[in-house]
Amino acid sequence: MSDCCCSPKEATGFQSAACRACQSHGQPVDELTIKALLTEQALRRFEPGSYRFCSDAFCDVVYFSEGGTIFTKPDVRVPIWQKEPPGLRMVCYCFDETESAIARELRDAGVSHAVDRVRAHIAAHRCACEVRNPRGACCLGDVIAAVNRAQAR
């Protein structure tokens, strides 16, 4: 997506590794993202290395490394939207766009401007997805998908 705030992470290191709990192949995520979002207790267990984000909704693992380090939902300071029940999830961690707010806006106004708001913040260079979003990536695609899901209901 050309108007995203950060470029996707390149798959480096352990491309064939999978989450030990669910066998999903996660997306690469920068160490900075992980360190910014871990609880104090979990951060004490952090070891440098190549990490991946596990987005499987039924898996408790959030981050895993080639070296075997894992961090689960309780190790992370924020709810992981991919692992939360639909309807109340945080979609944009920088600007507090939630599924419930999008649905309310659609119900009250007939249209949601969540995508436009996020795009405006991106254009103004205000987002910090690399440290606020647990995936460490731009949320614009997630916001678009959330609006589309809410409109389909």
Image (tube, rainbow, N blue to C red):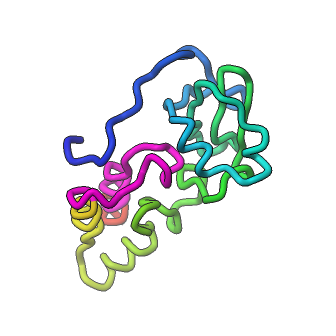
Name the image quarter holding residue 34: top right
Task: Work out whether residue 65 or residue 44 is closer to the camera in this orientation and state it.
Answer: 44
**Vertical relation: 43 (above or below) 153:** above
Q: In x, y percent, where is residue 152?
A: 32, 62
Inspect the magenta stretch and tell me whether residue 64 lies in it.
no
Q: Residue at x 58, y 53 (%)?
A: 80
Q: Which residues are magenta?
A: 122-147
Labels in figure, total: 0
Residue 143 x/y as whole percent = 35, 57
With respect to residue 114, does 76 lie above or below?
above
Q: Nearer the viewer, residue 49 or 137?
A: 49
Where does residue 54 sit, x and y in percent of width and height?
59, 36
Q: Tell me if residue 127 is in the magenta stretch.
A: yes
Tell me if 1 is positioned left or right of 127 in this view. Answer: left
If the image is split into quadrants, where does the C terminus sit?
bottom left
Q: From the viewer's perspective, tell me whether residue 66 is left or right of residue 110.
A: right
User: In the rendered image, which quarter is residue 105 located in?
Assistant: bottom left
How far across and how far down the image is residue 52, in percent? Answer: 57, 31
> Residue sitting at 72 percent across and 37 percent down?
46
- Quarter holding the N terminus is top left
Residue at x-position 65% and y-position 27%: 65
Return the residue nearer the eye: 104 or 140: 140
